[in-house]
Image (tube, rainbow, N blue to C red):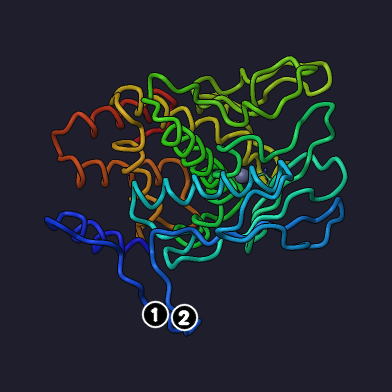
Amino acid sequence: GCAQQTLHHVQSLLPNPGPPRPTAIAELGELRTPGHAQRRIHDAEQQMQLPGNLRRREGQPASGDAAVDEAYDALGATYTFFWQVFQRDSIDDLGMPLIGTVHYGQGYENAFWNGEQMVFGDGDGELFQRFTRSLDVVAHELTHGLIESEAGLVYFNQPGALNESVSDVFGVLTKQHALGQTAAEADWLVGAELLTDKVNGVALRSMANPGTAYDDPLLGRDPQPAHMRDFIETRDDNGGVHLNSGIPNRAFYLAAMALGGYAWEQAGRIWYATICDPQLPNDADFATFAGVTLNHAAQLFGRQSPQLQALYEAWTSVGVAL
Ligand code: ASN
Ligand code: ZN
């Protein structure tokens, strides 16, 4: 888990930590070097059998298939983000291979983490284009795996919406890191590359202004609330996990904007410590999660810090009572 983070932090504070040392993974009986992704991209060839045919392994040249190569590059950028910023070695922090399958199903309009690997549809070309086009979507799916290794937030009601929100948070942070964007420069959109030009909209979701990503005759209107007063009680979508995630998404956005600079350096660090905290229950509701973010802001930046103040104001502005 994230316990290793402390160790790596100490190492990186030494005058010359040197290159990462290979370590033996007991279960696998093999040597591996932290700091390097181990990617494997498969092709389902429009079927729904997983993982499909292996099309590109770590170190192999571009395949020429856009979806294969986008998945390879995006998983690499996601690995790099978590390694460089949090010294985290893949999904499980033990160098787990990053396995992705593209061309899943026919015109399949989604992407997902299935508990073992990431899966990407091609979209039908009418509403959605292939899901590997968006780095933040690829990173979102990988983050579901990471959350499963750490907080284990159950995928239902408020803990499920937190699972979704944290995946959006690290999804957009991965993109911001890859582009070198500050909080103020970023668009805070999830899936900005996915909608076809037939759709009246800009993305799948907006973290800055949940509920405004699209308004379209075919797709309908972006249903996300941005405040607890608009919280949606439903049994659909695992209890509205992709709906109510708008509320913690906006809290993160507000905190990151108040703090300025690169969002992964302050707000991101607090969120990462929160999902790695064994004290965070796997059935945490928004208020419990918010409380744990405040604990970590205090621990990382101090009880009188502007970070703690900004976070308190962010949660309060979206109606999460502390
Ligand atoms: N794209 C969706 C997600 O990762 C798929 C799902 O609902 N599990 O949240
Ligand atoms: Zn998700």
Residue 24: image tag = 1
Residue at (76, 23) in percent of width and height: 196
- The percent coordinates of residue 112 (x first, y second) are 68, 49
Q: Residues within 10 Å of mark 2 (few under 14, many from 20)?
A: few
Figure quadrant of the C terminus? top left
* First in residue order: circle 2 vs circle 1: 1
Q: Quadrant of residue 253?
A: top left
Q: Which is nearer the eye, 133 or 92?
A: 133
- Secondary-structure class at tag 1: strand
- Secondary-structure class at tag 2: strand
Q: Which is nearer the eye, 72 or 279?
A: 72
Q: Quadrant of residue 225?
A: top right
Left/right placement of residue 217 relative to residue 208 reads: right
Rendered position, 291 above or below 216: below
Whether pointer 2 and pointer 1 mark residues with C-beta atoms closer than 8 Å, the reply is yes
Separation of residues labelled 2 and 1 (CA atoms): 6 Å
Rendered position, 8 above or below 107: below
Q: What's the residue type where badge 2 is placed?
A: Glu
Figure quadrant of the N terminus? bottom left
Reading the image, the residue beneath label 2 is 30
Q: How many marks?
A: 2
- The percent coordinates of residue 268 (x first, y second) are 36, 40
Residue at (16, 54) in percent of width and height: 13
- The percent coordinates of residue 62 (x first, y second) are 64, 48
Residue at the extreme front of the image, as rendered: 61
Residue at (53, 44) in percent of width and height: 167
Left/right placement of residue 297 relative to residue 155 reads: left
Q: Residues within 10 Å of mark 1 (few under 14, many from 20)?
A: few
Q: What's the residue type where badge 1 is placed?
A: Ala
Q: Which is nearer the eye, 2 or 53?
A: 53
